Amino acid sequence: MSAETARDFEALERQAALIMSVLIGAGCEAVAPAIIQPADVFLDVIGEDLRARTYMFTDPEGEELCLRPDLTVPTCRLYLQRHPAADVARRYCYNGSVFRFQPVGAGAARPNEFRQAGFELLGETDAEAAETEALVLVIKALDASGRFDYRMRMGDLGLFQALLADLEMPERGRQRLRAQFWRPEAFRAALARLTAASPGSLIGLPTDLIASLDTADAATAETIVSEFMLRKGIDLIGARSVSEIAAGLLAAVEDSRAEPIPQATARHIEGYLRIAGPAPVAAEALNRAIGSAGPRSAKAVAAFARRLTLLAAAGIDTNALTFAAEFGRTLEYYTGFVFDIVSPKLGDRTPIAGGGRYDKLLRSVGAVRDVPAVGSAIHTERLLSVVNGGAS
Amino acid sequence: MSNQLPASLPGTRPGKLLLAIPSKGRLMEETVAALSRAGLTLRTSGNERGYRREFAGEDDIDVLFVSASEIARQLKAGRVHLGVTGEDLIREEILNADERVDMALKLGFGHADVVVAVPQSWLDVASMANLQEMARTFHRRHGRRLRVATKYLHLTRTFFRENGVTDYLSVESLGATEGTPASGTADMIVDITSTGSTLRANGLKILSDGVILKSEANLVASRAAPRNATISAVETRVLAQLRNAIPVKG
């Protein structure tokens, strides 16, 4: 980061104080999680994009560590240290530095060290109420910092999960689509394979071995694979056992026999992913597109509508809230409502604030149960540049 | 940007074209031979200060012997004008390679592929699609991610992402990568191979669509290195001499 001038530093500090007073006023406890974090925790929970941008290092004792690339994971770890049973509702706020490698070179718009002020609402059980509160709170914090033009964008990853769960398809296909959701290209390829009459799952696998596995059960398959390896002089190398390899071959055989999923199902998924527009209009489109796909989709669509009602009641102009089914597809730890705030000055690719629901994160950093969680962070340097009229 | 050469490397003279060539192994021998065919023969005696060498009868070029991966970094930083190194190292060391350097000339030697290789005993994994499927199962079954040993961390990450493989962890390996699956340090590898025989000897096989890059030695020009008219003219001449000396294929 380039050396900041004293004036910028003071302006940032003043702005952070305003934001923090709004958050503390909403009942958040101010916390300061550690800057140096264990690398493995982050590697497992953050998406691959952020993983590639995390500064990692080894300390003199060989411990793999990283500079925190965000404040949400450290705040969740702090909650677990204080409440190992993960059975209480807590709300925290913070203001501090995060560190991200910028692949094409750091610059003023994309520094490799910047500050985030934000909050996390952990353990709140009324999902839509907590989500409404999160968006309202971040808008209030932005308003406290100064006036500027902004747009609100939102998505809801829960809708896709619900639709996928309701649609008829083999479980392995469902798992594959769920895993690839975050990478639109790979997702399209996976969907195409699932609808193809011959999915090609056996291409390149040893033909004679596959033929002899045709009707085998797991135990027989293991024996057949063992004998095959012996005959071909192939040594078993590494952590994967013969039974694991046999199971993989059987799964490929099963895939090759699976009925392709109907084109209509694929179109249903693609149709959903194209929905976009002002939130109230999108709500109607969602209801038409997936409202009757099954019980989970109906529930997710109803939750979407309820959230909009709550947002309107809290004074948010929902017509100014843009929904896109694709939105949030790059943020791997979110599980439901996601949003960001963009300004015409910095453009759509440089959000000033963002956040959403991440119900699986606490368990993956060690909680004994799922903890409902929603939060948001403000990129304070960007905020300062827009409220200053870009003069910083 | 300044017109001055950056803090000059030991033994180099300002205002000269700086050419970096590999400091050891077959790549060095073949580079020296190719240069010699192009009329650029290294002087065996003469000014031996530092590791700078010169071509016989050529006063405008300073030659530096540097390790092949260091050449990529020097080209990126603009500390040399030209360098001979493998495309694999250029693509690995320089994230936006095409903006930073110009792959001016393929030299026709140093052929090798960067490949994804897994144990032959993985009879259920023949392609990247199989690997994608297997990696997810592996994570669930073993409670850890699949470990991929490689010195090509960047190439691996990009290729695996394009192929939808995400449930893995790369482990940096700086030598004898092909032995890591057998020793248990890693589950599979991404490595360079020319004939595949070392891989086979270590019980590994290449995935059918697992060729990440077909690499060979290139003459590479740095876009960042500052040049004056003299340096540019010498550079153009060296490039032409080398191009004419490369045997035409077929």
Image (spheres, coloured by chain):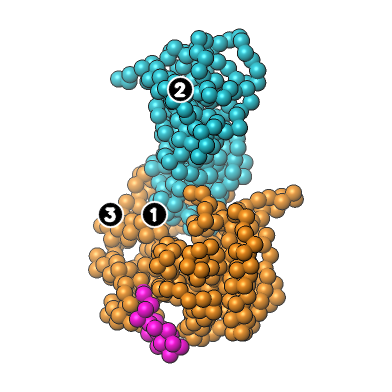
Residue on which disc 1 sits: A252
Asked if both marks, 3 and 1, belong to the same chain, the answer given is: yes
Residue on which disc 2 sits: B230
* Whole-percent x, y for residue A279 in the image: 35, 79
Which labelled disc corresponds to residue A198?
3
Q: Amino acid at mark 3?
A: Ser
* Whole-percent x, y for residue A16 in the image: 61, 72
Q: Residue at x 72, y 51 (%)?
A: A59
The total number of labels drawn is 3
Chain B drawn in what color? cyan
- Predominant secondary structure, magenta span: helix
Q: Is residue A273 above or below residue A122?
A: above
Chain of residue at mark 1 = A
Q: Amino acid at mark 1?
A: Ala
The chain displayed orange equals: A
Q: Is residue A318 above or below residue B43?
A: below
Residue sticking out furthest to the right:
A61
Q: Is residue A312 left or right of residue A365?
A: left
Q: Nearer the viewer, residue B198 or A384?
A: A384
Look at the numbered discs 1 and 2 and tell me whether their residues touch, using CB distance below 8 Å.
Answer: no
Q: Is residue A155 above or below residue A242?
A: below
Q: Nearer the viewer, residue A127 or B91?
A: B91
Chain of residue at mark 3 = A
Residue sticking out furthest to the bottom:
A313
Q: Quadrant of the C terminus of chain B?
A: top left
Q: Which stretch appears magenta?
A: A302-323
Q: Say if the magenta span includes residue A278.
A: no
Is residue A264 among what the camera can see? Answer: yes
* Whole-percent x, y for residue B182 in the image: 59, 40
Q: Residue at x 28, y 69 (%)?
A: A271
Chain of residue at mark 2 = B
Q: Earlier in the sequence, mark 3 or mark 1?
A: 3
